[in-house]
Amino acid sequence: MEENRLWQARWIWAAHEDGYDHGNQLVYFRKTFDVTEPGSTRLTIDLSADSRYRLYVNGRSVTTGPARGDLQTHYYDTVDLSGYLHTGTNVLAIKVLHYAQGQPRPSAVPSAHTGALIVEGSLLDGQGEVLGQLHTDSSWLCRRDQAISFLPESFTCVGGGELVQGSLLPHGWEEVDYAASAGWEQAVELGPAYWLYDGFLQPWQLAARTIPEMFERDRSFVRTMRTDAGEGIVIGQADAERSWIYVPAHGKAAVEVDAGELTTGYLRMVVEGGQNSEIVFLCSECYESADGVKGVRDQAEGNVLRGYREKYIVAGLGEQKETYETFLYRTFRFVQLEITASEEPLRLHRFYYRETGYPLEVKGEFSSSDDSLKPLWDISVRSLQRCMHEGYYDCPYYEQLQYSMDTRLQILFTYNIAGDDRLARKAIYEFHSSMLPSGMLLSRYPSIQPQVIPGFALYWIMMLYDHLLYFGDTAHAARYRSTVDAVLDWFGRRVSADGLVGEMPRGYWSYVDWVKEWETTRGVPVSSGPLTVYNLMYADALQKAAVINEVTGRPDTAAEYRTRAQQIIRAVNTHCWSEERQLYQDSAGLEQYSQHTQIWAILSGAIQEEHASKLAGRLMKDRSLLQVSYSMAFFLFRALSEAGQYEQSFELWEQWREQVKLNLTTWLEDPVSQRSDCHAWGAVPLYEFTSEILGVKPGGVGCERIIIEPKPVQLRWARGKVVMYGRVIEVAWQISDGAFKLQVAGLDELIGEVRLPDGTSKMIEREERIGLECLWPSVK
């Protein structure tokens, strides 16, 4: 990570009396410059801001940023603007929103005491000679916004709604010919990017962006769900390019539109006339009953849309159209508009959105003989995409926070369908950066409200192990060994005389899963005493940490961690196993049993071979066990696979099929509260279909060997593509004429071990395409 490179630009902001922003402040910045030969003139800038910015060049929106980080790693973006230049006067226009303490704000965006902008860039000719410099300093013009108020949030923490007085907006401020007169002033220099001497730090420690820019593309709504219009009101189609809604003076209209799928985007509206008219809008994930019960998600009749209400008060620029766009993106499938015209009629020419998200290039594919699995793949891809922005988010509508449990699963899904680890590396670094002096990691980060879920720190170790397994980057893994040591030491210090990790400290949240029977304890298996599942997760993390240390040159530490893992496992088997029930208790001596504890007993190796196989069978058949929800379902699949009982997993897909019947376009957060309609920890099909049914997995650190072990379960055929070690592996298999027939392509220079359903295996070295078969039904 780059530290304190030499910057020539200065941090700037609008003048304030005491150096503090006492409320959220949005400031507009402009810098004009001349270009004589745009074809050969080059301009690349580095820029960052506290807290968020949108950049325009000559009226065209270019990008937003900076990538979310913390103040110790405050990212800057590098943007090539050469293609936006034209002959004559050009303008860089940047609006920056600073979030003040105690004000409506996204929970994942930290901020300093004041807003700030820094831009560094030089105009270069075709030979690389400097024609001029555009570094931020007091020559930049700025203007504080007076039009937008940010509304407090009641049930989300993504940034608050907007109340906008359109007449106070500087319409056209981003254009070249805008006259920056009244209200505009010279910017104030806050200081250099870093102090030259004595090591004193600025609030913002700049580091280069490590992920690509978010994509943006214009999208239209696909249908009108419901309208309520009086006399003289004309409402066209939701996807109309112009003259969508006409509302006469003093008229009122309401309309609800559907994007066709749950999505994320900046809402945009183009209006004409209607001075002082009000447009109230509300974004919602789905329709629900008046008392909050969710059913078929696009069933409008008898149901309502819920969300926070925002308002745009129209300026009314005569025959000139005015455009309004939300500063932050919104999450929605449905949007409700309520329009109240004032003294003059209003035309809403267009209402659409600028869709945004991480530019995930999906290379994986899957199809099979069971048509009911196809929507599971499609919805899973969409769920993952909607939860990928500048981090892996738990849910885009309610929180937009990066949690380590959720993130570990989302990362694995990303590896298999895209092979992209850029967002994963950023997440690994950020959780490492969240470490408390005790050695514990925060459960979500970046976040302005620190939270600890002790088990989530173990998921971070597993996340680091997964990256090593898939990419073989030992230098990357070695970078974080000290953090792994700190987390494991934190748990190790809590091992009591009975050999178990004891009760978690008060004030921490020992969350495991959303289970109906655990509602009163908010996802915690027991209200007091040691958690068996945490002990087993700790043992699993120790074993994965042993691999990390072994391949990065610390064999003694690896041996120590394996020893500690076995000690924990012996303690669990001694104190938490019920001989009568043949199950692991949720806490030592407590007659409470869940799938969760049995799952981690298998995954940690506390129980093995035929005993693990029998336990896996009870996992599926014993309905007295408290059942996993979507968040822990991934690990249920893993336990069945590990214990050789994967064929029993096919019935688990019914809970995903039930969601399809509700016309969900992304996966639910959990079946208990059903709070969010988009949560990517439910995108389990992306892993199961690629790693198990198609059977493509890493066979060692860095995919030095690829295992291809298809599991047909109840299918007759399956085919698809899996990304592994930078290659797209194509797999197709079918059962016909009493034989299991397999085709594999794309191995190229890789070594593959093919394991057939009859138990035979074959090593394949450096063959582009192979075909194998075995007898069927020699295995069931």
Image: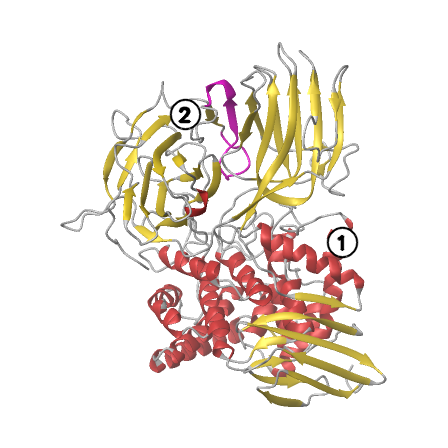
Report x, y in % for residue 37: 38, 43
Residue 361: x %, y % from top left: 57, 59
Foreground: 676 or 95?
95
Question: Relative to 432, does residue 448 appear above or below in the rendering?
Answer: above
Q: Earlier in the sequence, mark 2 or mark 1?
A: 2
Task: Assess whether residue 204 is covered by the magenta stretch.
Answer: no
717 or 522: nearer the viewer: 717
Q: Residue furthest top?
A: 343
| Residue picked out by circle 2 | 145
Q: Quadrant of the N terminus?
A: bottom left
**Residue lying at 46% horizontally and 25% vertically, measured from the top left:** 149
Compared across the picture, whether 721 is left or right of 129 comes to right
Region of the chain picked out in magenta, as a range: 152-169
**225 up-or-down from 72: above or below:** above
Percent x, y of residue 97: 41, 34
Query: Which amino acid, by three-letter code, is at mark 2?
Result: Asp
Q: Residues within 10 Å of mark 2 (few under 14, many from 20)?
A: some
Between 254 and 464, the one lying in front of the other is 254
Pointer 1 residue: 658
Q: Residue at x 76, y 60 (%)?
A: 654
Most common SS among magenta residues: loop
With respect to residue 648, does 423 lie above or below? above
| Residue that lies at the very extreme toward the right in this rendered image | 737
Tell me, yes or no, if residue 593 can be seen here: no
Q: Which residue is located at x 31 percent, y 54 percent? A: 127
Residue type highlighted by circle 1: Glu
